Image: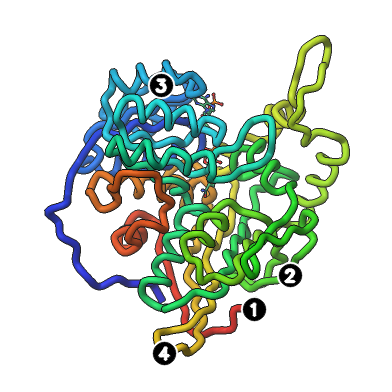
């Protein structure tokens, strides 16, 4: 069954505009490919990144002369400001790394441009990602009349939209939220990460954490796990990890008593991860090698497969969704499951990237679309679940991410 929304939106909102995408990795590739498919909306696109050659290669493959490219070091606010002033975009879509978030937000604020990203800020020297740094910009964005949309990938991103949709249409109160993220794909490599290795390894090697009865409960990494059954895939061992959207979702839906995030990992992947940690290659502090300071995890990134190039031999599916328990207006308990399955092979055929980049890049392009259409435009700094989920979900299937829902089923959780 495919999810359906039946109401019609006021098309007077329809606008168009210029977008500046920062970051020419797998996610940037997908977002720009999708934007180029919507020429009436994205009238001009600029793709800028640290390495201009990567932007040029993406633009050449897409073959659309509306895509311009530029070199920028997004760690340098002055360079970002200069680029924004020369291109004058309506919105900057930040698909570089979380380390750049605050600098790009500063540049947007200084130049009067809207902002969107897919991952929350993380200081390079400490694996601790949290929204507090970016939420601290709320008043400044509000006073400047600017919109900032945080976490508009899949998770975070669509998982927040799914939760908002469930809260709007199916529940009076949400009590339990379990976000379930399965990658049942096989890329044929002994070990690779599906997005930026440094960010990915920092994320999955940290302690687990979930929300219960008004407080955070901490676990050892991968301590809690169980098999969960994913639609069209079957059972996969799923591990409780901390994921950033839990922080905003428990704040924005205070009726939630328990919120957890589960991700599937194969045995092979976990064994490699353990070895990487045990031998010190996951360290994020600099070590001196041959008189030069290197950060082991950054060196590791240089020798691991490039996630943007895993797509060619990737087979299988991803399945990401929200399993929700709560009550209706009459106080009766219900369960609800809303999810998307995405094929690595189809993602590759369309964009030359795999499904993890695809499921992130499509929502990023859609968030920019929501902004340009005036549907997600509100001065301040917002997480996606604070906007109306309906117009987003109305478009999501059309743009390559169909979604499905089931009611009153066994959630396994
Ligand atoms: P990649 O590492 O493949 O790409 C990142 C790009 O950003 C690279 O082109 C890189 O340049 C560029 N970049 C890095 N630093 C700078 C800088 N200082 N200035 C300009 N450009 C810079 O990452 P992905 O495409 O896999 O991921 C992109 C983002 O998406 C990440 O923040 C990641 O955390 C997020 N993400 C979010 C998900 C979600 O569902 N919400 C899921 C997956 C990813 P260079 O090529 O020169 O290194």
State which quadrant residue 61 falls in: top left
Question: In this rendering, is residue 35 above or below 321?
Answer: above
- Proximity of marks 4 and 1: CB atoms separated by less than 8 Å: no
Tag 4 residue: 330
Tag 2 residue: 226
**Front: mark 2 or 3:** 3
State which quadrant residue 265 falls in: bottom right
Q: Which residue is drawn at 82% across and 41% down?
A: 277
Badge 2 marks a residue whose secondary structure is strand
Work out whether mark 3 precedes mark 4 in sequence or the reverse, and give the earlier one: 3
Mark number displayed over residue 412: 1
**Front: mark 2 or 4:** 4
Image quadrant containing the N terminus: bottom left
Q: Residue at x 64, y 78 (%)?
A: 412
- Proximity of marks 2 and 1: CB atoms separated by less than 8 Å: yes
Task: Tell me the CA gap for discs 2 and 4.
Answer: 33 Å
- Residue 38 lies, in percent from the top left, at 26, 44
Q: Residues within 10 Å of mark 1 (few under 14, many from 20)?
A: few
Task: Tell me the CA gap for discs 3 and 4.
Answer: 52 Å
Q: Residue furthest top?
A: 291
- Say whether residue 121 is left or right of residue 137: right
- Residue 282 lies, in percent from the top left, at 77, 36
Work out whether mark 2 precedes mark 4 in sequence or the reverse, and give the earlier one: 2
- Residue 276 lies, in percent from the top left, at 81, 39
Tag 3 residue: 80
Task: Tell me the CA gap for discs 4 and 1.
Answer: 24 Å
């Amino acid at each position: 069954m495919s999810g359906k929304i039946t109401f019609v939106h006021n098309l007077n909102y329809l606008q168009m505009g210029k977008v500046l995408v920062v970051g020419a990795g797998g996610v940037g590739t997908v977002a720009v490919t999708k934007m180029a498919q919507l020429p009436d909306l994205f009238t001009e696109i600029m793709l800028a990144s640290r390495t201009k050659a990567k932007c040029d290669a993406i633009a050449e493959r897409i073959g659309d002369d509306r895509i311009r490219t530029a070199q920028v070091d997004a760690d340098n606010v002055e360079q970002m400001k200069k680029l924004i002033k020369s291109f004058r975009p309506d919105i900057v879509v930040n698909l570089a790394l979380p380390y750049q978030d605050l600098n790009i937000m500063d540049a947007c604020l200084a130049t009067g441009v809207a902002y969107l990203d897919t991952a929350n800020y993380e200081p390079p020297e400490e694996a601790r990602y949290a929204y507090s740094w970016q939420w601290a910009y709320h008043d400044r964005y509000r006073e400047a009349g600017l919109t900032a949309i945080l976490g508009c990938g899949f998770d975070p991103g669509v998982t927040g939209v799914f939760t908002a949709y469930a809260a709007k249409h199916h529940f009076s109160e949400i009590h339990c939220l379990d976000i379930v993220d399965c990658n049942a794909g096989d890329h044929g490599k002994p070990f690779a990460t599906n997005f930026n290795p440094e960010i990915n390894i920092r994320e999955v090697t940290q302690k687990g954490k979930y929300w219960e009865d008004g407080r955070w409960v901490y676990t050892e990494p991968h301590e809690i796990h169980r098999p969960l059954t994913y639609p069209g895939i079957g059972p996969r061992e799923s591990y409780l990890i901390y994921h950033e959207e839990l922080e905003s979702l428990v704040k924005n839906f205070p009726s939630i008593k328990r919120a957890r995030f589960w991700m599937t990992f194969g045995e092979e992947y976990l064994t490699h991860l353990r070895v990487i940690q045990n031998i010190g290659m996951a360290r994020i502090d600099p070590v001196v090698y041959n008189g030069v300071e290197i950060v082991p995890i950054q060196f590791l990134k240089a020798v691991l497969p490039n996630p943007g190039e895993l797509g060619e031999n990737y087979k299988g599916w991803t399945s990401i969704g929200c399993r929700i328990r709560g009550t209706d207006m009459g106080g009766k308990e219900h369960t609800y499951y809303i999810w998307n399955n995405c094929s690595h092979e189809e993602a590759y055929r369309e964009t030359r990237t795999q499904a993890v980049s695809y499921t992130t890049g499509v929502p990023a392009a859609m968030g920019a679309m929501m902004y340009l259409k005036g549907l997600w435009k509100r001065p301040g700094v917002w997480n996606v679940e604070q906007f109306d989920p309906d117009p987003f979900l109305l478009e999501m299937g059309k743009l390559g991410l169909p979604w499905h829902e089931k009611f009153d089923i066994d959630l396994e959780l």
